[in-house]
Image (cartoon, rainbow, N blue to C red):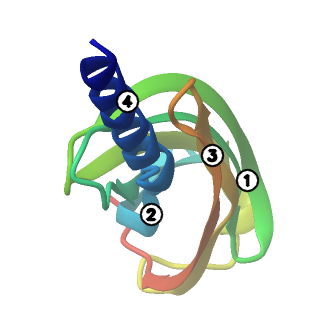
Amino acid sequence: MKKSFFLFLIFIAIVAGYFYYSKPKPPVFRGMEAIQIKPIGTEGAELNADLVFTNPNSMRTQLGKINATISINKTQIAILQEEFNAGISPQSDYHYPIQIRFEKKEVLSSLDSLSVISVDVSGNAGSSTMFSNYTLPIEFHSTIKLRII
């Protein structure tokens, strides 16, 4: 009886140690994809893009909040403060779509349809669930050829 109990305790210690030392890594922010700017009427515009996160783990992980500032040509157009619940499959990407409307005159007034613009994202993302409590930085800068649809 004592031997079985002792083996059971050793098994529990091994399992607990495995979960303690193999804590999952947080997702990795890879950048923005599918960036488009669409005119809306004569004075507005809309930025559409995907924020891309990769899960480097061999098990599912959670993403639940984004706090980021979006800028075009060094002019802030939005502050994202979103809370949601998204599961990211193992070894795969998660695309978080964003759609931001802003006034053209503040950002794009002197540009034509062939201009090059800079897009910046800065902030953090994370999750606060019991087994996935983390915060990861979001930093992205890109110059893109403006494609007005």
Marks 4,1: beta carbons within 8 A: no
Q: Earlier in the sequence, mark 4 or mark 1?
A: 4
Give the residue furthest to the front. 2
Element carrying mark 4: helix
Q: Quadrant of the N terminus?
A: top left
**Foreground: disc 1 or disc 2:** 2
Q: Quadrant of the C terminus?
A: bottom left
Element carrying mark 1: strand
**Foreground: disc 4 or disc 1:** 4
Amino acid at pointer 2: Val
Q: Which residue is mark 4?
A: 12
Q: Is 14 situated left or right of 75 in this image?
A: left
For label 4, the crowd category at 10 Å Cα-Cα, with few meaning under 14, some 14 to 19 and many 20 or more, is few
Q: Which residue is mark 3?
A: 134
For label 1, the crowd category at 10 Å Cα-Cα, with few meaning under 14, some 14 to 19 and many 20 or more, is some
Amino acid at pointer 1: Ile
Cα separation between marks 4 and 3: 26 Å
Q: Which residue is mark 1?
A: 77
* Residue 26 on image: x %, y %: 49, 54
Camera sees residue 113 = yes
Cα separation between marks 2 and 4: 32 Å
Q: Earlier in the sequence, mark 1 or mark 2?
A: 2
